[in-house]
Amino acid sequence: MKPLPLSKRPVDIALIVFFCVNLFFITYIVDVEQLVIADADHFQYPLWPPAKMVDLVHWYGHNFDPVLIARPAWWRATIWIDSIFFGPFYAFAIYAYWTGKNWIRFASIVWASVMLTNVSIILFEEMVGEHATPHLGRVLLSNAAWVIFPIIVMYRMWRSVYPFSAAGRRV
């Protein structure tokens, strides 16, 4: 089935923007910082990400998100999942959603499922864990997109084997 033009798929435009933010900022700047700097209080600036981005991540962690600074093993595991699996997914998803390629459907459902699982674990820690945030409202708001967009993707891709065509369009 022929895909609808992207201009007729506003939800896909929003998803592409979300995937771009994740690919170019979250996964390969924010997350890489947490992989290359083991201790946010004692470190040397790495080659990547840029020092200003490292400072931004540390400022946010020190002021609002203690688990980001603590970096327990389970947290780093979610970061590795993001860097190894989600990063490439975002690159493929940007292309597939832009051009209306149905082959991204299954990977989108898998991504949404794993993302919702990871974010649920992270938010549980943020609420009641050892490194719970004293700024829960701000942290929940700053993480809301990683709950909302996976739900949209799951809903969108679950409904039709041709999600980008007129026959599969219900969102």
Image (spheres, rainbow, N blue to C red):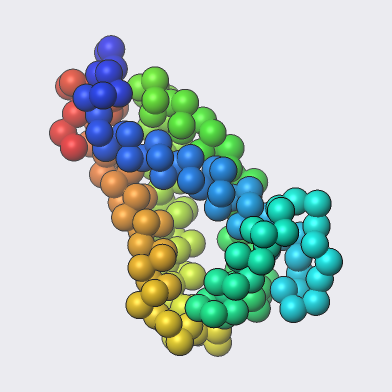
Q: Residue farthest to the top?
A: 2
Residue at image coords 31%, 55%: 148
Q: Residue 115: horizontal and vertical position, in percent? A: 45, 54
What's the residue at 18%, 37% (across, down)?
A: 171
Position above or below: 45 against 4: below
Q: Is residue 8 visible?
A: yes
Q: Which one is nearer the viewer's eye here, 169 or 103?
A: 169
Residue shown at 56% from the left, 43% from the top: 24
Identify whether 13 is placed above or below 28: above
Residue 74 relative to residue 107: left or right: right
Please state the horizontal and vertical placement of residue 79, each as a whole percent of the image. 61, 59
- Image quadrant assignment for residue 6: top left
The relative height of residue 16 versus residue 100 in the rendered view (above or below) is: below
- For the N terminus, give its image quadrant: top left
Seen as rendered, the residue at the extreme front is 52
Q: Is residue 86 visible?
A: no
Report the residue at 17% width, 22% height from top: 167
Total labels drawn: 0
Front-most of 92 and 23?
23
Determine whether, in the image, residue 89 is placed left or right of residue 97: right
Across and down, in percent, residue 139 comes to 42, 73
In front of the other: 52 or 148: 52
Relative to 108, residue 150 above or below: below
- Relative horizontal placement of residue 61, taking residue 39 as reference (left or right): left
Left or right position of 131 against 40: left
**Residue 58: where, in percent of width, then height?**
63, 71
